[in-house]
Structures are given as C-alpha cells and as structure tokens.
Amino acid sequence: MQLNADKSTATLFTPDPAEYNTTLNLTINNAIIPTVKNPKILGLHLDPKLNFTQHIQQTKEKASKTINVLKALTSTKWGKDKETIVATYKAITRPQLEYASTVWSPIVSNTQMNKLQVIQNNALRIATGCTADTNTNHLHQETLVLPLSNHLRLHASQLKEKTKLPYHPLHPLRMQPKPPRIMKKTIFQENNNYTTDIKTNSQNIELAVITNNMKQIHTEIVHQYTQTIPDNTILKTKAPDIDKSENTLSRSTRTLLAQLRAGKSPFLLTWLHKINPTKYNSPLCPLCGTNEHNTEHIFNCIHIPTTLEVADL
C-alpha cells in the first residue's frame, strides 16, 4: 500500500501539555506531511489531549441547527403534540448528539457533556411547552426521555453487550491484553465502571441471550435514574406517571398542565410575581385574595371547590 502525501496528515497524541504544539517533521517521498491538531476520521474530531473538545463543539453546532425544525412544528398554543416533537427530536437531533459516543462518552468531562445536555433540554422544553426555568428533571419525566449522560451510558453498555457475540466486528477488542498504563477510558476495559454489564455464561453466547441482556441493561439504567429523581416540589413525593388519557387533549391544554405540574405557568400569579413583581405586584389569588395563587391553591380555593387533588394533574 502506498501513502499519498497530499491526502495525509500527522497528529501527536500525548498526555504531556508541553508537547501539544509540537510540529512533527514527517515526510512521504520527501513531501512534508502537515501536522494538524484536530484530524477528522469518519466524522469524529480528534485532538492531542483526546478530550474531544473540538468534537463536542462541532456536535453542538450541528445539533443546534435541528432545534429550529422543532420550533417550526409547534408552539405553546398550536402545533404537533408532545409525542410527535419528542419522536422528531429522537430522529433528527439525538443522532447528532450521540454520534460515535461509545468512543468519547466515557472520556469527556461533565462540562463538555452539559453543553450537549443543553441542546436536549431545549428540545424537551419545546415538546412540553414548559418555561425556560423549568427543572430539567421535570422535563425528562414529562417526556420519558433519559438525561443525555444516562442515555449514552445505555448506548455504550448495549454495544458492549453485543460484542460478546463471537461474530461481532468488535469482538476482538474484548480480548485485548491489559495495557501497561491506562491513559484514557474505553468501554472495553476490565472492571469498567462506566458501562452496565450482565454476567453471561461463556458457553451460552447466543443472539437471544444477548438480546435479553440488552433489555435488562435498559431496565437497570432506567431504574437507576428514576431512583435519583428528587421528590416533586409540589407533591413533596415522587410524581406518578402521567395518565395516557391526556393524549386526547389539545396542545394548549397539555402545555398548561405540564406547566402547572412544574409550578411555573403564566396562569399562576405567584410565579408571575416572582419573575416580574413590577408588572404583577401581588402573588395572591384573584378570587379569594388571601393565599398565594400557586398550583396547590388552585385545588383548595374556596371560590372554586373541587374534589380533585394536586396529584390528579
């Protein structure tokens, strides 16, 4: 095989900060190969530190452009329903966010991961119609979408499980000898604490077994996340699942319900007073004038008696 100098570049991957700006004097047939810091291989941007900062930035820019499609499909009063917007997000935005994630997700810092999480948060706010200051846990519960870091861990865990099949292209990576010094994490390291693994009898590696293991991994990672969700600020306990009958309601009604469940809605004078006390000088209920006009009070105001409770939201 003959290398083409015009189509080749050189990059030095090193943990030493003093070497990040090193120029490599490599040649092919007396032609100097340019040294580049961020080579792009199959859509993945690399860098000398292998912290994938450049790749995260490029991914963020690409994914941000797709958010405009979601905005064009709906608003708080009209447009497609929540499920359609979430499905569209999963079809056009999340593939951008998770591209090659099994390589970089075990390595990137929380700061870099949060840059991508912001994109998902924006998409879920559009889907639910919730306000910009709505708690992200509420957004994920409303849409039944995992936070991006949990989703990428699920993605990596399921890929690693697939590689147990002897005929999988990445199966040989499971047999690599332990390196003398581990510089960067990978999903194939022994005792890896990034992925979720299911113990499997080495004599019983069949597709049906692996498929079942992948379902177990999904269930376990979802369960782990749900256990970390804090109590609902209104109910002071875990929020129940949203009843499927809500799917028959209009977009504007469902948006209002999602906002009320978060305690942040233009319908609530307490919330409006908190963000603009000049325009909304009183947080009290306009009917009784004695209690703050919040989600809890809507169900307890003496002027609008009801048998419903806050949990019925």
Image: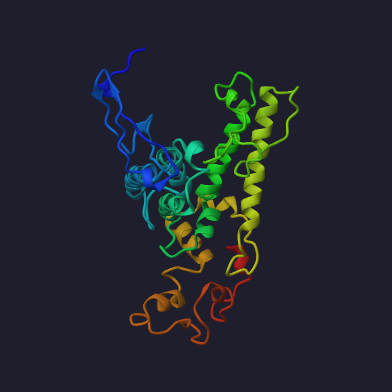
- Give whichever of 20, 311 is nearer the camera: 20
Residue 243, picture quadrant? bottom right
Above-or-below relation of 141 to 55: below
Please give left or right for residue 188 compared with residue 12 in the image.
right
Residue 281, picture quadrant? bottom left
Please give left or right for residue 290 compared with residue 66 in the image.
right
- Give whichever of 48, 297 is nearer the camera: 48
Location of the C terminus (image quadrant): bottom right
- Give whichever of 222, 5 is nearer the camera: 5
Above-or-below relation of 256 to 62: below
Above-or-below relation of 245 to 264: above
Please give left or right for residue 190 compared with residue 284 in the image.
right
Location of the N terminus (image quadrant): top left
Q: Determine the residue positioned at 54% across, 58% down.
A: 137
Residue at the bottom extreme, as displayed: 290
Q: Which x, y percent locates residue 151?
A: 54, 44
Q: Determine the residue positioned at 64% across, 23% down.
A: 165
Q: Which x, y percent locates residue 279?
A: 33, 80
Q: Determine the residue positioned at 48% across, 81% down.
A: 285
